[in-house]
């Protein structure tokens, strides 16, 4: 393989997972990568490993540069198994390597792999490791997105290796931001933030502020998934700051499902009403769109309108799944509204509203239920609901 170099003697040695489409429930429509980095100096350092099914790729890529047994350090920025599950095999090859992790990373390693790794050194924020001409500096990043998470910074090269932060699930033959389509890159960065980090917005904002206050220059951000930000690392930092602040557009996302088409008719009438007021509308019919896509659209929307037919006195299962997912990710500062059709007893709108109330969401109280099939007057009410919500988010 052609060696991929970030700077002199710093290499990408990870793996590309072209075919993964389900990343613990997140629909990774463009695959992903597991990035690992090799730094050669007086001491040789591997930063992170890859998912175990790609361990051979990692070993091959390292071996094309140095023999794995010549590794002196293996840094574990994060123990989640897409980054650590090759560690048992790599540690056997690199018998003399010291493993470096945060204190909670060490605990997590034991919880995942038992006492397999004898030689684990812990580091805290501000600790440094001199490896020759270079200095590695460590910054703990608890809950970004696991308790053990930390960033590694190469001082002399000004390269930040923040593991999951600033990543994208994007498989490609290219390794750098300036080599890929910018629209696709930012779309996947937004999808990644919405589906992994959205609930951690306050911590993301705090960590960005902390890094800015530290005044560390960053020429490159090398995350653990997707491409490396070398041309414009500030682009993704600014995007994260905006998402973490909950900045949103005059945009309404209508997420719904339907049994016999009534809720679908209602959804389309609501959309027309909203569009008539000049706001952007996105429709996510579950079973055509999925939870991943819906949450990505919701990230920068001001309102979410959710529709469900009543089934067995409650929500339609796909809508229940969506609301479970959405309440877990805690979208910030959105106006929520609910609608749906029913045959006799109803129950879906009540159940959805109750779920949103428990999650602490702001609810637009003019929710709408229609029996069996919406007639012309019913559809006018739906249109009016769309208009009302659009007006409310436009003021
Ligand atoms: Fe890419 Fe939290 O693992």
Image (cartoon, grey):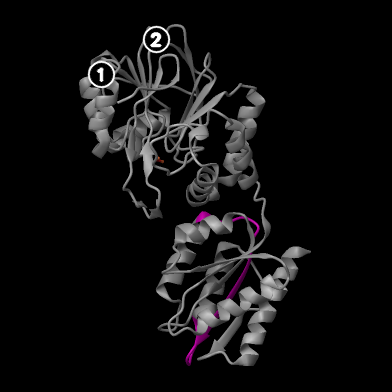
Query: Height in image: 308 above or below 23?
Result: below
Q: Which residue lies at the image location 57% right of the left edge and 31% below the top edge?
A: 233
The quadrant of the image that shows the N terminus is top left
Name the quadrant containing residue 374.
bottom right
> Which of the two discs, 2 and 1, labels the residue nearer the N terminus?
2
Task: Where is residue 152? Give x, y as percent.
Answer: 47, 24
Query: Height in image: 151 above or below 382?
Result: above
Q: Is 146 included in the stretch rendered in magenta?
A: no
Q: Is 338 included in the stretch rendered in magenta?
A: yes
Q: Secondary structure at mark 1?
A: helix
Task: Where is residue 227? Give x, y as percent.
Answer: 46, 35
Q: Secondary structure at mark 2?
A: loop
* Boundaries of the magenta span: 329-347
Q: Please name whichever residue, 120 or 330, is drawn nearer the observer in this view of the structure.
A: 330
Q: Which residue lies at the image location 36% right of the left edge and 32% below the top edge?
A: 107
Q: Is residue 64 left or right of residue 8?
A: left
Q: Which residue is mark 1?
A: 68
Q: Which residue is mark 2?
A: 41
Label 1: few (<14), some (14–19) or many (≥20) C-alpha neighbours in 10 Å: many
Q: Which residue lies at the image location 35% right of the left edge and 35% below the top edge?
A: 83
The quadrant of the image that shows the C terminus is bottom right
């Amino acid at each position: 393989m052609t060696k991929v170099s970030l700077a002199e003697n710093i290499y990408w040695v990870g793996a590309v997972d072209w075919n993964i489409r389900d990343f613990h429930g997140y629909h990774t429509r463009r695959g992903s990568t597991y990035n690992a980095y090799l730094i050669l100096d007086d001491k040789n350092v591997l930063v992170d490993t890859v998912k175990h099914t790609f361990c051979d790729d990692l070993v091959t890529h390292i071996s094309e540069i140095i023999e794995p047994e010549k590794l002196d350090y293996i840094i574990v920025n994060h123990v989640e198994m897409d980054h650590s599950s090759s560690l048992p095999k790599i540690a056997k090859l690199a018998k003399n390597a010291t493993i470096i992790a945060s204190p909670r990373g060490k605990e997590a390693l034991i919880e995942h792999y038992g006492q397999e790794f004898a030689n684990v050194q812990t580091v805290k924020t501000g600790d440094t490791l001199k490896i020759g001409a270079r200095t590695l500096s460590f910054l703990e990043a608890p809950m970004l997105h696991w308790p053990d998470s930390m960033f590694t910074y190469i001082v002399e090269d000004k390269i930040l290796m923040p593991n999951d932060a600033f990543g994208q699930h994007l498989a490609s033959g290219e390794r750098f931001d300036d080599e890929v389509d910018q629209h696709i890159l930012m779309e996947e960065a937004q999808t990644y933030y919405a589906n992994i980090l959205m609930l951690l917005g306050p911590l993301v904002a705090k960590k960005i502020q902390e890094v800015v206050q530290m005044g560390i220059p960053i020429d490159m951000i090398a995350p653990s998934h997707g491409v490396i930000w070398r041309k414009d690392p500030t682009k993704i930092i600014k995007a994260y700051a905006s998402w973490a602040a909950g900045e949103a557009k005059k945009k309404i996302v209508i997420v719904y499902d339907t049994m016999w088409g009534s809720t679908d008719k209602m959804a389309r009438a609501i959309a027309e009403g909203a569009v008539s007021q000049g706001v952007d509308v996105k429709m996510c019919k579950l079973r055509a769109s999925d939870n991943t896509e819906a949450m990505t659209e919701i990230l920068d929307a001001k309102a979410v309108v959710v529709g469900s037919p009543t089934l067995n006195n409650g929500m339609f299962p796909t809508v229940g799944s969506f609301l479970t997912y959405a309440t877990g990710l805690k979208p910030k500062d959105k106006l929520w509204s609910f609608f749906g059709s029913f045959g006799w007893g109803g129950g879906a709108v009540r159940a959805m509203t109750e779920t949103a109330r428990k999650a602490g969401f702001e609810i637009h109280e003019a929710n709408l239920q229609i029996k069996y099939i919406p007639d012309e007057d019913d559809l006018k009410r739906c249109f009016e609901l769309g208009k009302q919500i659009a007006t409310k988010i436009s003021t």
